Image (tube, rainbow, N blue to C red):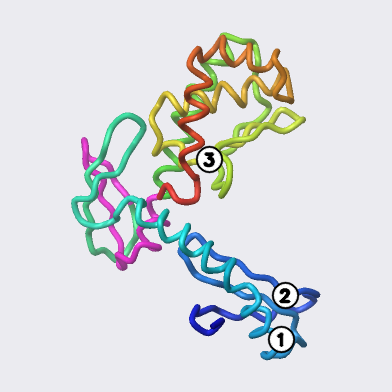
Amino acid sequence: MGEDIPYTLHRIPRRRRLSLHVSDDAEVIVRIPLRASLREAREFVHSHVPWMAKRLLLVRAQLARRHPLEEASRLPLLDTELTLHLHHAARGRVERQDESLHVHSSCHERASVVRLLEIWYRNEAQTYMAGRLALLAEKTGLWPKRITIRSQKTCWGSCSARGAISLNWRLMLAPAALVEYVLAHELCHLRHLNHSVAFWNLVEGLDPDCHAHRVALRRLQPSLVL
């Protein structure tokens, strides 16, 4: 039964335990210690078939909702949409022309296109979100020590005890109102590094619809937006 689900096996030096992982692309990865036998790996996989089947079903359903990345696909950018155009070129680059996004690449496989799009969206995120945070900071007097654009798999943003705010570049694919909520949320953590009543009152002062935006954001999963 375990053989019905294909998987990739990796032997990892200094690893002590066997582990299973289902990637965002529905690939099953099994990691085992260097000296573990293939029989141990097969038995381990077989014992986790119910979990793998359930997890694969969920991931595949989420994959079906991903934005297609083919000629003339529509990609979100805050409250607008851009038409994707794919071009063959030796050097990879992305250019925006009005409402079109032109991806130049020697390979049009999804992974290659995503890598180029991530660079472009990251740059857009750095400019847009830093500017929006500055406006909110002027209202509150709360200024982050550092702003970092990252590629978190499970969260949209975070704020450290040292006053550094990290934001997910994939926020640029969400409606602007939800981005504004995340920015307000993380900025307010500079005063309240918790989720107390005082914290939510501060957030609500910046975003009166913060609770509705919080619910809407929970329906999205960062790693599966693009």
Task: Give the residue drawn at x 42%, y 36%.
Answer: 172
- Residue 50 placement (x, y as % from top left): 58, 69
The three-letter amino acid code for the residue at tag 3 is: Asn
93 sits left or right of 12 in the view: left
Residue assigned mark 3: 168
Q: Secondary structure at mark 1?
A: helix
Q: Quadrant of the N terminus?
A: bottom right
Point out which mark residue 40 bears.
1
Residue assigned mark 2: 18
Choose top left, top right, bottom left or bottom right for residue 11: bottom right
Which portion, as a residue range, is magenta? 94-117
220 sits left or right of 102 in the view: right
- Residue 202 placement (x, y as % from top left): 63, 12
Q: Please say if 73 is above or below 123.
A: below
The three-letter amino acid code for the residue at tag 1 is: Glu
- Residue 210 placement (x, y as % from top left): 52, 19
- Contact? badges 3 and 1 (CB < 8 Å): no
